[in-house]
Amino acid sequence: MQQRQRVVVGLSGGVDSAVSAWLLKQQGHEVIGIFMKNWEDDDDSEYCSSRQDFLDAASVADVIGIEIEHVNFASDYKDRVFAEFLREYQAGRTPNPDVLCNAEIKFKAFLDHAMRLGAEKIATGHYARVRSVADASYEGGLRYELLKGLDPLKDQSYFLHRLNQAQLAKTMFPVGELPKTEVRRIADEIKLPNAKKKDSTGICFIGERPFREFLNRYLSNTPGPIKDDRGRKLGEHVGLSFYTLGQRKGIGIGGVKEKGAPRGGGEHEPWFVARKDMANNTLYVVQGHDHPWLQQHTLLADDLSWVDGRGPSVGTQPLGAKTRYRQADAPCDILLANGQEIALRFPQAQWAVTPGQSAVLYQGEVCLGGGVISRAE
């Protein structure tokens, strides 16, 4: 029997956090729910209303029989996450706000708030796991590992890779041991009001609205030429910030056909964004998914964060990496690791490795941490 603890659960209004709270209560813990409001601009719009999410979370708390508190972290979010999000887009990179939100809000501002409430642990509905390992070189004789969630289709360790020892020591992931189908079954069985609620996708402050329309409200952009790999102008882009490497839809050159197939693609193959030349405000596109410009064997990452506080070194094996969420771990070697940067080499070329995204390293089921991709070739 686990020791009874005071656990503060982040209730988002979704089914994963709801079942997490119920499981903890079943285990005998004193459970308190917290609903985090992270965005206020046009929050009452059709695209993203936290009001409905809070009503769903409150209904869940009522069914489970726990208290719930509504906490506003919107100013923290704007300062720590959104400002960085805009800076990265303005610089031509493609950031991952979920990674930053977890590190800065859910496991920092929220964790601090929970500790002020006298919590011993916090819990979220993420599909990941924490394991403690005896290690005399760490405080308290324990080292904490971040593990993949057992459901390979839902594993969210990629988004959590910036968590540190102090944060993991205080964190529980109750659904990390379960497949999503089981989480849905439990929610249905205990008659949770949100049992059938669809999983949220994307970033709440953008919701389902067109991404370009949203960014346009915050970023100034200068149109410029779209060119192919031979330097021929195919059209005009609306601003480099609005495009990401590997993008296929919404480029704005539909119907353009090549005479004589270029490298990597036939005459009717789709176009992909392949490069951004910030200095000359030029967007480069190529034809065909397998074009050489979309294949990278090495990358450089900085802004490193390692779960164990130390990180891997040159020669660490076996090693796999994800350069985007939902891809399989790709075998790789470390060419450079100096504390500030890490260089990775992939025997098998990786597709459209994108600056601003995270390169996350794994040893089997253990997530080691990672960094922000600065360059790939």
Image: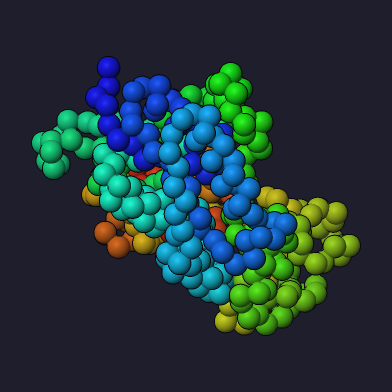
Is residue 240 shown left or right of residue 146? right
Q: Which residue of the protein is positioned furthest toward the left in this rendering?
A: 136
- Split into 4 quadrants, where in the image is the N terminus? top left
Near-viewer residue (130 or 172): 172
Nearer to the camera, 99 or 324: 99
Instruction: Return the x and y of residue 250 as percentages of the image width and height.
Output: 77, 62
Residue 193 position, x and y percent, is 62, 31
Relative to 47, 160 lies left or right: left
Q: Residue at image x 57%, y 37%?
A: 59
Is residue 4 depicted above or below 38 in this figure? above
- Please name whichever residue, 297 or 144, is drawn nearer the observer in this view of the structure: 144
Judged left or right of residue 94, residue 238 is: right
**Residue at 64% from the left image edge and 65% from the top image edge:** 42
Image point (52%, 33%), residue name: 62
> To which quarter of the image does residue 192 belong?
top right
Residue 182: percent from the left, percent from the top? 55, 21
Q: How is the image coloured?
A: rainbow
- The structure residue drawn at horizontal position 54% and vertical position 41%, both measured from the top left corner, is 57
Number of numbered discs on residues: 0
Q: Is residue 200 visible?
A: yes
The picture places residue 335, in percent across and down from the top left corner, at 34, 53
In this orientation, does residue 172 appear? Answer: no
> Left or right: where does residue 140 sit relative to residue 203?
left
Q: Is residue 369 above or below residue 39?
A: above
